[in-house]
Amino acid sequence: MTKPVVVIAEELSPATVDALGPDFDVRSVDGTDRPALLAALAEADAVLVRSATRIDAEAIAAAPRLQVVARAGWASTTWTSRLPPPRASWS
């Protein structure tokens, strides 16, 4: 069985990365490098970001398998609902 691909687009604590365990194919990318991010999202089932990575309509369109966008941190974010559900974005 193929492991779900989790793209980590920004630096997260080692404990956070370790918590994903062996059940996921964890891949890191610089979320501020737009071409690299879009390429990584092509195979992603989930993406973990903080505040520098922009997951917008273009990023979601590049990620046909994407099921989860998770943002690590506590600050409020802007939810963009102009995309049809369930494909919405954070900016």
Image (cartoon, helix red, strand yellow):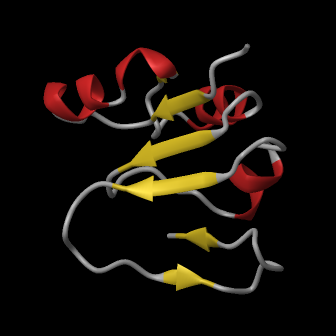
Give the total number of marks visible in the rendering.
Answer: 0
- Is 54 in front, or is 85? 85
**Which quadrant, please, contains the N terminus?**
top right
Give the left or right position of residue 77, taking residue 24 as reference: left
Give the left or right position of residue 84, taking residue 40 as reference: right
- Which residue extends farthest front? 1
Observer able to see residue 26: no
Q: From what the image shows, is residue 17 above or below residue 74?
A: above
- Is 80 in front, or is 24? 24
Residue 11 occupies quadrant:
top left
- What residue is shown at x 17% (from left), y 25% (from top)? 14
- What residue is shown at x 47% (from left), y 25% (from top)? 29
Q: From what the image shows, is residue 63 above or below residue 11?
A: below
Observer able to see residue 65: yes
Residue 23 rendering spot, x and y as whole percentages? 49, 20
Give the left or right position of residue 69, taking residue 2 as reference: left
- What residue is shown at x 74% (from left), y 86% (from top)? 82
- What residue is shown at x 42% (from left), y 14% (from top)? 22
Residue 5 rendering spot, x and y as whole percentages? 61, 26
- Which residue extends farthest bottom? 81
Q: From what the image shows, is residue 68 above or below residue 40?
A: below
Residue 30 rendering spot, x and y as whole percentages? 43, 29
Residue 78 rendering spot, x and y as whole percentages? 45, 82
